[in-house]
Amino acid sequence: VYIWDMDETLILLKSLLDGTYARSYNGLKDSVKGMEIGKCWEDRILQVCDEYFYYEQIEDYNQPFLDALSEYDDGKDLSEYDFNNDGFDYVNKRKLAYRHRVIGQKYAQGLRSVLDQQMLKLWDDLYQLTDGYTEGWLSAGHALLEQPNIHVLVTSGSLVPSLVKCLLFRLDDVIVYSAWEVGKLQCFSWIKNRFPTVRFCVIGDGMEECEAAQKMMWPFIKIDLYPHRFPGLTIRMMEHYMDTIY
């Protein structure tokens, strides 16, 4: 099982917005262009969250994973359900579970099931522009996740925007855990219980996932902008890290 951090590992966003990515090239990258690309992604993520994933309604009720409220879902047919006028509040976890069920269905179906052709074109153009600017960072991550292994994503961000980021950055079919409230060590423990008989490797850029991996006695691969290591990472290199520990 490969456990991935999201931001600044599989995708780049913060380092585009604040110019860190461009500065790592010592003047060879246009930082203004990078910031503009980052702002476009930020706007697109918020738009999709609010328009298709009920984020305005459930922003304050983050869950660590999609099935966290499944015990409250009675399986009601939601095809004609009015999510805007059902008197939703956090006390009624059944109504929150309904929203997570639909979010899970949309996540599984992908953005092509909800976006129109104009939005799909804008999305595709932005992805290609970003991948070119970052010298294949996005497509490198996508290619690694296509390898026949189990891939799980653990993010410091809240669940719904992280799911939307996965879709927008073409990281489809990835299991996602949000460490927003519970921390990454707790998420790693859940993942170990979910896959009890396999080997694990953690890939990320932050101290929290590094320390959590050490506590779990799992190998950790550090990703950073210097010297732009991620697009050169291969499954063979990752397997070498695992063989060293196991």
Image (cartoon, grey):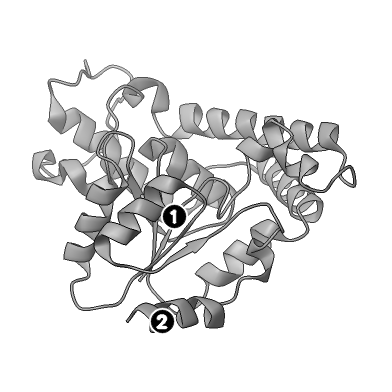
Quarter of the image holding residue 181? top left
54 vs 78, left or right, is: right
Residue 137 in the image: above or below residue 98: below
The label nearer to you, 2 versus 1, is 2
Residue 183 position in % (x across, y down): 29, 41
196 or 77, nearer to the observer: 196
At mark 2, the secondary structure is helix
Residue 231 position in % (x across, y down): 68, 65
Q: Name the residue rendered at 71%, 50% in the picture.
A: 127
Of mark 2 and mark 1, the one earlier in the sequence is 1
* Viewport quadrant of the N terminus: bottom left
Q: Name the residue rendered at 42%, 50% in the picture.
A: 107
Label 1 belongs to which residue? 109
At mark 1, the secondary structure is helix
> How far is disc 2 from disc 1 in space, using C-alphas?
38 Å
Q: Name the residue rendered at 49%, 42% in the picture.
A: 164
Q: Name the residue rendered at 46%, 77% in the picture.
A: 241
Label 2, residues with CA under 10 Å away: few <14, some 14-19, many ≥20? few
| Type of amino acid at the residue the image marks with label 2 | Thr
Residue 8 position in % (x across, y down): 58, 47
The answer, for residue 79, to whether it is visible in the render is no
The disc at residue 175 is none
* Viewport quadrant of the C terminus: bottom left
| Type of amino acid at the residue the image marks with label 1 | Gln
Q: Are marks 2 and 1 in contact (CB under 8 Å)?
A: no
The disc at residue 244 is 2
The answer, for residue 112, to whether it is visible in the render is yes
